[in-house]
Image (cartoon, rainbow, N blue to C red):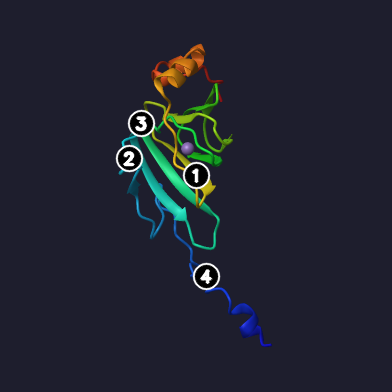
Amino acid sequence: MSADTDLGAAAPAPDQSRVHGFHGDYGWDGVERLPYKATEDAPFRDVARQVLASAPDLAAELRYFEVGPGGHTTLERHGHRHAVLVLRGRGRCLVGDAVSPIAPYDLVQISPWTWHQFRADPDRPLGFLCLVNAERDRPQLPTADQMAALKRTPAVAAFLDGGSTAARPKD
Ligand code: MN
């Protein structure tokens, strides 16, 4: 049996080998800047998405999200996991019932079924890489009861109301 026959069962993966040069405005050559969840009626504000890596033989997708100054992602939870690496700006994130300041190059791990949201500081965009499963479930938005439960934690209530930024150590 030849090597060609051994390898012949699966279709060849598309050749995506290349270098996508990085631009100073947080874009990459050949990568389209897309509106965030344009087809969904989800509450978010001023978020752009770029899919950096996605292929049928890759079980994950690497995306870059950018939240405009004062903007925020959708408050959501789902069965898939996120690994987020902040690249640009500053902001805060809610993960579960904890609100944390974030800055480059903080790493944020979000486990399945954990409520999460990212908010940019008012004076600059917040950009981050987000790694997810290629095949994943759709996010759930909180019900009124779930939102009320989240807001029983004062720091979470302040975060969700878009209030004052959490105290952050000077650096
Ligand atoms: Mn999510």
Which residue carries the number 4 mark? 13
The kind of residue tagged 2 is Glu
Inter-mark Cα distance, 2 to 4: 31 Å
Disc nearer the start of the sequence (2/4): 4
Disc nearer the start of the sequence (1/3): 3
Q: Position of residue 96 (x, y in %)?
A: 55, 26
Q: Nearer the viewer, residue 111 or 117?
A: 111
Circle 2/circle 4 CB separation < 8 Å: no
Disc nearer the start of the sequence (3/2): 2
Numbered tag placed on residue 69 in the rendering: 3
Q: Position of residue 32 (x, y in %)?
A: 35, 54
Disc 2, SS: loop
Which residue carries the number 1 mark? 129
Disc nearer the start of the sequence (1/4): 4
Q: Nearer the viewer, mark 1 or mark 4?
A: 4
Classed neighbour count for the residue bearing mark 3: other residues with Cα under 10 Å, few (<14), some (14–19), many (≥20) = many
Disc 1, SS: strand
Classed neighbour count for the residue bearing mark 2: other residues with Cα under 10 Å, few (<14), some (14–19), many (≥20) = few
Inter-mark Cα distance, 1 to 4: 24 Å
Numbered tag placed on residue 40 in the rendering: 2
Rendered view: 120 above or below 135: above
Can you tell me whether the CB of the residue at mark 3 lies under 8 Å from the nearest atom of ligand 1? no
The kind of residue tagged 1 is Leu
